[in-house]
Image (cartoon, helix red, strand yellow):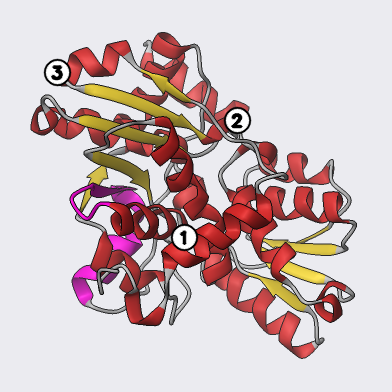
Amino acid sequence: MNSKVQTKSLDIKKEALEAENRIRKHIRETPVEYSPYLSKAGNCKVNLKLENIQFSGSFKFRGAMNKLLSLSKKEKEKDAITASSGNHGAAFAYACNKLGLKGTIYLPEIATQTKIEALRSYDADLKLYGQDCIQTEVYARKTAKNNNLVYIPPYNDIKIIGGQATIGIELQRQIKKIDAVFVGVGGGGLISGIAGYLKSINTNIKIIGCQPKNSAVMYESIKAGKIVEMESKPTISDGSAGGIEQGSITLDICKNLVDEFILVTEEEIKEAIRLLVEKHSMLIEGAGALSVASFIKVKKRFKNKNVVLIISGAKISMDQLKEVFCQGYN
């Protein structure tokens, strides 16, 4: 295996294949949908990978289920704790429900009401802490440690990454040739898994990280060579916003395997949301639109290529919808 793929002894391909066997019966193999409009715009072939219709509404269910199923019998007898801005929390709650486990979800106080209300439909305790997702993560991990509970990270865990990597396994089955994959990035678990698996199969596949300019923490951290602490500005891509846990294994993986990052403005993200509604009758959240917005920004560079855009999640609030459509059509 290419040494860059086996980043610091983390064999992501191995983790992906183990996750595939572990979670396949629990997850949905999400379809890929050809986009005539985007393909014509870029003079290439564009497929959308529809993780917005994964169970719990995002790709996060894969990682959460893989991590929970990986726990020992003794660990499964304990209560589990996680931290989330919304989508990982929903995935964690859904998976706990399915497996008969008890869980507590810590959310940042800035979490959208839509995501909070969605979590209330699951049998999980909700607690709010902190103004940024990284504050919430640190507190939840510390709480788990101090109370001898099990902590389920949103991204900083090889089992979480292995679960997300099953998207790469599906793409390999679904599309004969892939030249580039655009992936939204927050903490880096999704792109680490996809890049780790696909580049173990073909190192020539370009992996492109997509972030909002208002919260490009991974991009800035890679530039700095360490995880930076920076204040994120408000972004409609709330699912990818906020800081990254110090020491996260995703930093080195992204540094080694992500070929480039593209940063997009708030208006570019909103335009991508509108485009998916108009051209695909598909409603997605801001983080799910990062790949579309980024592709549109650099589409001329992918002429005659086979491109995949990861549509990572579906949850968008009514306030965000008003912001996208009322302002977009004024």
Residue position marked by numbered label 1 in the rendering: 189
Which circle's residue, 2 or 3, is located before the other in the chain? Answer: 3
To which quarter of the image does residue 82 belong? bottom right
Q: Is residue 44 above or below residue 68?
A: above
Q: Which residue is mark 3?
A: 43
Query: How far apart are the two marked residues, 2 and 1, measured between alpha carbons?
Result: 19 Å
Q: Is residue 264 above or below residue 134?
A: above
Query: Could one spot residue 161 in this view of the protein?
Result: no
Q: Which residues are magenta?
A: 202-224
The amino acid type, in three-letter code, at marker 3 is Asn
| Residue at (85% x, 81% y) in the render | 74
Kindly identify which residue carries mark 2: 53
Hey, which quadrant is residue 304 in on the image?
top left
Give SS at disc 1: helix
Q: Is residue 268 magenta?
A: no
**Percent position (x, y) of residue 302?**
13, 31
Where in the figure is residue 315, as x and y percent of width and height?
Answer: 60, 34
* Residue at image location 33% in from the left, 75% down from the top: 7
Sequence-earlier tag: 3 or 1? 3
Question: Is residue 209 within the magenta segment?
Answer: yes
- At horizontal 82% and vertical 63% (from top left) the residue drawn is 103
Q: Position of residue 6 (x, y in %)?
A: 34, 73
Residue 98: x, y in percent?
A: 84, 49
